[in-house]
Image: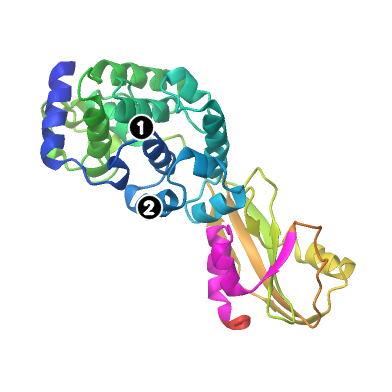
């Protein structure tokens, strides 16, 4: 199958079956495409849509995002995960606003925080009609199967080879539709499991299908043992039925978000309570929970304490605050902490 036939077959399928009603497609401005592409990194379309709509309503353009407080941006992002994306988005918005225009070249886009070659290619092709290849997870899967490329797609040599294939098949015309089409194909037909090969517009020349290797390609990432970290989370409730929150460091896991005090052990927690002179009238140890990040499991033990006193200076200034449960709706909380609060609402209903 020639590159021209490849793109023509894909575009014919897209015209009939492609997704054309996604919110960032109307209109497909550089700003809206950029926001959607960042949100779609490691996140499915169905999850992204409500976040995108809410985000765009709050920040309809680069300037409004650049001028927004980071805490506010993170609160809108809460639940999407991979919070470095939101921090990079906010930082990049400031840089774009300062420059006075949205970058329209590959070099200028990849210079922005959080934008790699594939994201830049998607922005340029969809918003600026430039012929640029992309290589997100869906496209990697399509091309690895079509050309029966062996080896983990994240490896240096395989990655380079897939970029060459992507560049070869990217057309010079209808590039916005082509880019959306090949992403749609991977998302809807050439899926990780149970692909619908019989409906695929590329099936005639798909090497993985011919070799009956669709299930084994692309080659999975070599597995390694995911480490497990142990933590103790303190849910402190004061006399006024307020929850103690602290702001995490700007980088790292849940960077810049509000959470609960975290300790390595119950002994460390008890020592902290003593130092802060917090009068505990009730203490309840809840069942350990697990939250899995991309590179480790976090097993955390929630401990709920009720205090008989109101303490305003438990944490350093501007780092710790007391909130009623209903007030946390507008706070940038990690999803597991929000779920934890919701689950124990009866403990501090107020």
Q: Label 1, secondary structure: give it.
A: loop
In the image: residue 279, left or right of residue 206: right
> Compared with residue 312, is residue 250 higher up or lower down, i.e. above or below?
above
Does the stretch in magenta take in 336? Answer: yes
Give the magenta part as a residue range: 320-345
Residue in the picture at 23% in, 44% down: 188
Tell me which label, 2 or 1, sits earlier in the chain.
2
Q: Quadrant of the C terminus?
A: bottom right
- Nearest to the observer: residue 294 or residue 245: 245
> Compared with residue 19, is residue 210 higher up or lower down, i.e. above or below?
above
The answer to whether the residues at label 2 and label 1 have Cβ atoms under 8 Å apart is no
**Secondary structure mostly taken by the magenta-highlighted segment of the chain:** helix
Image mark for residue 74 = none
Q: Quadrant of residue 15?
A: top left
In the image: residue 232, left or right of residue 278: left
Give the spatial CA distance, label 2 vs label 1.
Answer: 35 Å
In the image: residue 321, left or right of residue 339: right
Q: Quadrant of residue 219?
A: top left
Image mark for residue 53 = 2
Q: Quadrant of the N terminus?
A: top left
In the image: residue 279, left or right of residue 181: right
Q: How many marks?
A: 2
Residue in the picture at 30% in, 47% down: 23
Percent coordinates x, y for residue 181 in the rendering: 22, 34
Residue in the picture at 35% in, 25% down: 124
Image mark for residue 219 = 1
């Amino acid at each position: 199958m020639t590159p021209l036939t490849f793109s023509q077959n894909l575009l014919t399928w897209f015209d009939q079956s492609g997704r054309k009603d996604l919110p960032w497609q109307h209109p497909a401005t550089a700003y809206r495409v950029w926001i959607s592409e960042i949100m779609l990194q490691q996140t499915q379309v169905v999850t992204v849509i409500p976040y995108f709509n809410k985000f765009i309503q709050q920040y309809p353009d680069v300037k409004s995002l650049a001028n927004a407080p980071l805490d506010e941006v993170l609160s809108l992002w809460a639940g999407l995960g991979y919070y470095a994306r939101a921090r990079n988005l906010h930082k990049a918005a400031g840089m774009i606003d300062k420059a006075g225009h949205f970058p329209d070249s590959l070099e200028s886009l990849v210079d922005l925080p959080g934008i790699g070659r594939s994201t830049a290619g998607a922005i340029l092709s969809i918003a600026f009609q430039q012929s640029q290849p992309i290589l997100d997870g869906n496209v990697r899967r399509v091309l690895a199967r079509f050309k029966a490329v062996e080896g983990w797609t994240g490896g240096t040599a395989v990655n380079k080879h897939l970029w060459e294939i992507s560049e070869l098949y990217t057309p010079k015309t209808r590039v916005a539709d082509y880019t959306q089409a090949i992403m749609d194909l991977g998302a809807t037909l050439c899926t990780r499991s149970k692909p619908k090969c019989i409906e695929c517009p590329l099936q005639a020349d798909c090497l993985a299908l011919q070799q009956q290797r669709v299930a084994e390609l692309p080659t999975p990432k070599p597995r390694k043992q995911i480490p497990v970290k142990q933590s103790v989370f303190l849910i402190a409730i004061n006399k006024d039925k307020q929850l103690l929150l602290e702001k995490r460091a700007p980088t790292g896991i849940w960077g810049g978000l509000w959470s609960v005090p975290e300790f390595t052990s119950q002994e460390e927690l008890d020592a902290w309570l003593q130092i802060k002179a917090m009068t505990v009238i009730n203490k309840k140890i809840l069942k350990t929970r697990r939250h899995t990040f991309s590179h480790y499991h976090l097993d955390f033990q929630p401990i709920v304490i009720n205090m008989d006193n109101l303490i305003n200076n438990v944490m350093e200034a501007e780092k710790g605050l007391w909130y009623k449960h209903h007030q946390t709706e507008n706070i940038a909380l990690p999803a597991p902490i929000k779920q934890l609060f919701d689950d124990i609402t009866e403990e501090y209903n107020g």
